Image: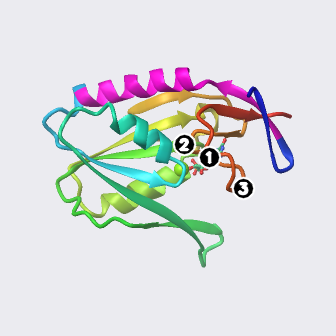
Amino acid sequence: MDTIQIKDKNFTISIREKEIQKEVIRVANEINRDLAGEEPLFLSVLNGSFMFTSDLMKHITIPCEISFIKLASYQGVSSTGTIKEVIGINEDVTDRTIVIVEDIVDTGLTMQRLLETLGTRHPKKIYIASLLVKPDKLKVDLDIKYVAMRIPNDFIVGYGLDYDGYGRNYPDIYTVVD
Ligand code: 5GP
Ligand code: MG
């Protein structure tokens, strides 16, 4: 299936499953090498990163824990509009090495907010592992240590990422047409 339709939009295949898996394994190996002895706590950001997290963790061979968090949007009182609240951090992150597992960093504002929130809980160190990064759209200065793939600014779906709730189930990544 090289083209798909979701609601009003058409998408064409842009990154195949095989290519995704190769880069995910590379990232897992980098983490295994860098964080050996750290017993990291992986924090997977739902919903978008569920597939990436699952594939990544199958190739993590060092002792580690995994947990899941979610960012709930709510309307802030300030003029900045919608901001996100982090829910589901039940673990004690004090002095822990944390690896945030994200699907995509676009402007980076979501990640910045997450780093701020986690930072108040005194972790030892926070690393970011993102399946995808759109480097040309980054608005904030972020050190994204582990990146599976860098992509152009176009909107994509598949491999966990959705368009209006649909399309997360595809094993490949698709880019919107025009
Ligand atoms: P940021 O705060 O970095 O601008 O946005 C991050 C969030 O925007 C991601 O976690 C994801 O939910 C959404 N997002 C950004 N770009 C895309 C895209 O191309 N496709 C999909 N499905 N979601 C995206
Ligand atoms: Mg996300």
CA gap between label 2 and label 1 equals 17 Å
| Residue placed under numbered mark 3 in the picture | 164
The three-letter amino acid code for the residue at tag 3 is Asp
Residue at the spot 70% in from the left edge and 33% down from the top edge: 174
Q: Residue furthest left?
A: 37
Q: Secondary structure at mark 3?
A: loop
CA gap between label 2 and label 3 equals 18 Å
> Which is more toward the observer, 161 or 125?
161
Regarding residue 71, the answer to whether it shows in the image is yes
Mark 2 vs mark 1, foreground winner is 1
Determine crowd level at label 3: few under 14, some 14-19, many 20+ residues with C-alpha closer than 10 A. few
Mark 2 or mark 3: which comes first in sequence?
2
Classify residue 112 as left or right of residue 15. Answer: left
Residue 58 drawn in magenta: no
| Residue placed under numbered mark 2 in the picture | 105
The three-letter amino acid code for the residue at tag 2 is Val
Residue 76 percent across, percent down from the top left: 59, 75
Q: Is residue 57 above or below residue 16?
A: below
Instruction: Tell me the quarter of the picture where residue 53 sits.
Output: top left
Residue at the spot 25% in from the left edge and 63% down from the top edge: 91
Regarding residue 143, the answer to whether it shows in the image is no
* Image quarter in which the N terminus is found: top right
Q: Residue furthest bottom?
A: 77
Instruction: Tell me the quarter of the picture where residue 107 sits.
Output: top right
Q: Label 2 CB, ligand 1: below 8 Å?
A: yes
| Residue placed under numbered mark 1 in the picture | 168
CA gap between label 3 and label 1 equals 10 Å
Stretch of the chain drawn in magenta: 10-32
* Image quarter in which the C terminus is found: top right
Residue at the spot 68% in from the left edge and 25% down from the top edge: 14
